[in-house]
Image (tube, rainbow, N blue to C red):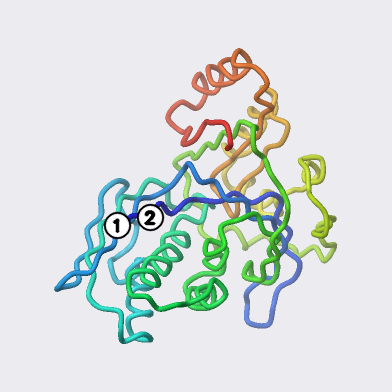
């Protein structure tokens, strides 16, 4: 079975309060980006094997979320047997795109189907929740308003289809601890309604609270965002705790799209990880 664990972007991110368990409650919109994805092949085997290609993995095998998800579910469901896992990493690490969480969620989806566990999406979301706050989102993989630590999800009606998305990832790694180090919670909630279809106009004023801290530590991220807005982006922001900066462009003519791409390549050619029209 082959799956394609995709990434996500955050449309706005508000840090609401610090919890007693040292986590933070937040509000954000998770939006799936299907065309930037890893590749995950899982099949039953006589012995467990795991092989990886693509981008070099940034952790030991025992800490990899794919392996952790398999081990957790194999302990809980005896019908899960040994598997051979082949993995190609395409989504950058430390990017704020949720690649690792998506890999874990898609591993759970594959095991559920391969071994006929009969788990619903709600049950799968509960299975992967301990592996990462945004893992449950990738079980549903549809636009969602997220609350709590990012694990309380409300599906929303939002489509960015037809817009051109550009994602730029410089060689900057932002740790979660670093991103939270200068955060001052803002109890004012994001102003949106989940009971009606949302449009780009609803989210244009949303900001990412992490930008204040992270941009001060890594000025290149602020420069990238400014450049994207200067060349005509209708919305630009950092995704999650960074360090990917993304922008949305109106994609009305091929000429304007070509002009945007040319100017991006002049400044950030080696950093552009995605530049395409959303489907």
Q: Which residue is more in the foreground, 166 or 268?
A: 166
What residue would you read off at disc 2? 3
**Considering the numbered disc 2 on the image, is that residue within a helix, a strand or a loop?**
strand
Q: Which mark is residue 84?
A: none
Q: Tell me the residue at 59%/16% (across/down).
A: 254
Label 1 close to label 2 by CB (< 8 Å): yes
**Considering the numbered disc 1 on the image, is that residue within a helix, a strand or a loop?**
strand
Q: Quarter of the image holding residue 255?
A: top right
Between marks 1 and 2, how big is the CA–CA gap?
A: 6 Å
Label 2: how many Cα within 10 Å (few below 14, some 14–19, many 20+): some
Horizontal side, residue 43 vs residue 25: left or right: left
Horizontal side, residue 127 vs residue 155: left or right: left
Q: Which mark is residue 41?
A: 1
Q: Earlier in the sequence, mark 1 or mark 2?
A: 2
Q: Quarter of the image holding residue 252?
A: top right
Vertical arrangement, residue 61 with respect to residue 171, above or below: below
Q: Which residue is more in the foreground, 196 or 167?
A: 196
Which quadrant: the N terminus? bottom left
Q: Tell me the residue at 37%/75% (across/down).
A: 116
Vertical arrangement, residue 138 with respect to residue 89, above or below: below
Q: Tell me the residue at 43%/67% (across/down).
A: 109
Q: Position of residue 96 (x, y in %)?
A: 54, 52
Label 1: how many Cα within 10 Å (few below 14, some 14–19, many 20+): some
Q: Which residue is more in the foreground, 165 or 45?
A: 45
Q: Position of residue 192 (x, y in %)?
A: 83, 55
Q: Position of residue 173 (x, y in %)?
A: 47, 50
Most extreme residue toward the left is 46
Horizontal side, residue 72 vs residue 256: left or right: left
């Amino acid at each position: 079975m082959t799956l394609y664990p995709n990434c996500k972007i955050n449309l706005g991110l508000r840090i609401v309060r610090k919890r007693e368990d040292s986590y933070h409650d937040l509000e954000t919109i998770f939006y799936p980006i299907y065309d930037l994805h890893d590749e995950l092949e899982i099949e039953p085997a006589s012995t467990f094997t795991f092989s990886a290609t693509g981008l070099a993995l940034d952790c030991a095998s025992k800490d990899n979320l794919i392996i952790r998800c398999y081990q957790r579910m194999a302990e809980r469901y005896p019908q899960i047997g040994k598997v051979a896992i082949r993995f190609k990493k395409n989504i950058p690490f430390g990017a704020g795109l949720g690649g690792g969480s998506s890999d874990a969620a898609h591993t759970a989806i594959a095991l559920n189907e391969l071994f006929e566990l009969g788990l619903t999406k709600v049950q799968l979301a509960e299975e992967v929740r301990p592996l990462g706050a945004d893992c449950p989102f990738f079980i549903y993989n549809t636009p969602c308003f997220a609350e709590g630590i990012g694990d309380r999800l409300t599906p929303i009606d939002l489509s960015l289809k037809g817009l051109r998305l550009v994602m730029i990832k410089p060689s900057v790694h932002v740790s979660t601890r670093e991103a939270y180090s200068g955060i001052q919670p803002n109890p004012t909630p994001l102003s949106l309604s989940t009971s009606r279809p949302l449009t780009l106009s609803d989210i244009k004023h949303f900001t990412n609270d992490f930008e204040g801290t992270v941009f001060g530590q890594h000025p290149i991220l602020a420069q990238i965002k400014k450049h994207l807005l200067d060349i005509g982006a209708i919305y630009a922001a950092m995704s999650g705790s960074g360090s990917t900066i993304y922008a949305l462009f109106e994609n009305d003519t091929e000429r304007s799209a070509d002009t945007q791409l040319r100017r991006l390549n002049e400044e950030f050619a080696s950093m552009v990880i995605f530049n395409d029209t959303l489907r």
